[in-house]
Every structure is written in structure tokens, then in C-alpha cells.
Amino acid sequence: MEFNEILKRRYSCRSYLDKEIHEKDIKHMLDNAVLAPNAGNLQSWRFIVVRNEVKREEIANACLQQKWMVQAPLHIVITGDLGYLKKHYGERGELYCIQDCTLAAGNILLTAASLNIDSCFVSAFDDDMLKRALDLPENVKPYVVLTLGYSNLKVEEKKRYDINMIVSFEKFGERQDKNIFPLKKLVKHVK
């Protein structure tokens, strides 16, 4: 699959079939996760692979009662060893931990899409409930829950703002750079 096709195929899936993901595909997603950029190459991320249905129900409850999540046969919870990064970067370490975990999640999502595995990025959760459900130590913080599986839903074309509305040149709000692409006029609606 071409890279642009992978980007277009990835979407936030909230309806999954009762079909397991092969071990080799899980390993492939995790192998690619750790190729993500990360602060100081400290690799503070920690991944928790959850297939047990009871545990997936606990996670769904911690994620503000999002019951649809239980359908997904696989959850990967991405946590960060915040204490480890704070030792190196002080308070800024928390921002770096968030960024590192999010970049790793992006690699998992794109790898999943390349394998025709559907997914959803979930960041709405009660930190304490999720920490208890996963028995996380004090210095480890949850940042992302990914649901993964297969769906029979048709992927719809993504609605995104026209690039002319969201790109600035040299400073915020400067809308023209004739060397990259000439802007004829600003579009006032979402395409």
C-alpha cells in the first residue's frame, strides 16, 4: 500500500468485528512504535498490550464509560515513565513524555492501517482509574489508549480544512508564498 493510501485509510473506528489480530502483526506495530522520535533517545514510553475482555471493560470504564471500546479485540495503552524524563529535563520532561508517546501512537496507527487493521486513538480517560486498572507504578503515567481490530465499515473520505486556511509563511497569518504555491483566495469553508 502506498504511504498516501495508508494515511487516507486510517480513521477513528468505533465498531469492531469479533476477529483476533495475529501475534506477528502486534509485534510489527510495536516494533514500529519504538522507531518514533523521542526526547534525547531516552525511550521513556512503556506499552501495555491488553487482549483480556474483562481488562478491556475496565479500560473502557476508565475511558469515561466508552463501552464501544470493549468490541476491539486489542488495546495498546501507551504510558510514559515520567520520573525518568523529569530526571533529565525537569518539568519540561512531562511535555516531552506526552510528545514521545503520541509519536509512538502515530506509528502504531499508521502501521495498523498498512496491515488493514482499524484503530482509534483515545485520550479521554480518568487517569487514576486507568492507573488502577493497569496497576501502574507512581512514576508511570497513561497518555494514550489505542483500540485495534477489524471492521466492516466503509472508510469515508476525511473532511479537512483547505490547506490555504491553515498554513502561514514566515509568521502566523501570513498566507502567501509564491514559491511554494500561489494562493488565489482564501476558502471560507471546509472541503
Image (cartoon, rainbow, N blue to C red):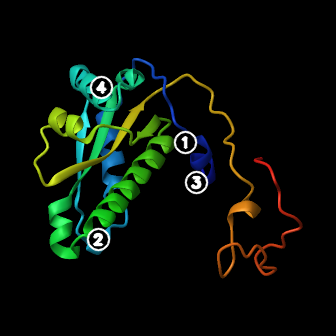
Report the residue marked by disc 2: 92
Report the residue marked by disc 3: 3
Q: Quadrant of residue 19?
A: top left
- SS at mark 4? helix
Left or right, residue 111 beside residue 95: right
Mark 2 or mark 1: which is in front? Answer: 2
Q: Residue 70 placed where, x, y %? A: 35, 22
Q: Earlier in the sequence, mark 4 or mark 1?
A: 1
Q: Can the viewer see residue 1?
A: no
Q: Check disc 2: other Cα within 10 Å, few if <14, some if 14-19, many if 20+.
A: few
Q: Earlier in the sequence, mark 3 or mark 1?
A: 3
Q: Earlier in the sequence, mark 2 or mark 4?
A: 4
Q: Residue 131 placed where, x, y %? A: 18, 40
Camera-side residue of 116 and 46:
46
Mark 3 or mark 1: which is in front? Answer: 1
Mark 3 or mark 2: which is in front? Answer: 2
Q: Residue 151 bears which disc, if any?
A: none
Give amino acid for label 1.
Arg
Give amino acid for label 4.
Asn
Give amino acid for label 3.
Phe
Reply above or below: 115 against 153.
below
Report the residue marked by disc 1: 10
Q: Can the viewer see residue 176?
A: yes
Reply above or below: 51 against 29.
above
Distance (Cα) linking label 2 and label 4: 30 Å
Q: Residue 88 placed where, x, y %? A: 18, 75
- SS at mark 1? loop
Q: Earlier in the sequence, mark 3 or mark 2?
A: 3
Q: Residue 61 bears which disc, if any?
A: 4
- SS at mark 2? helix
Tell me the residue at 30%/39% (across/down): 76
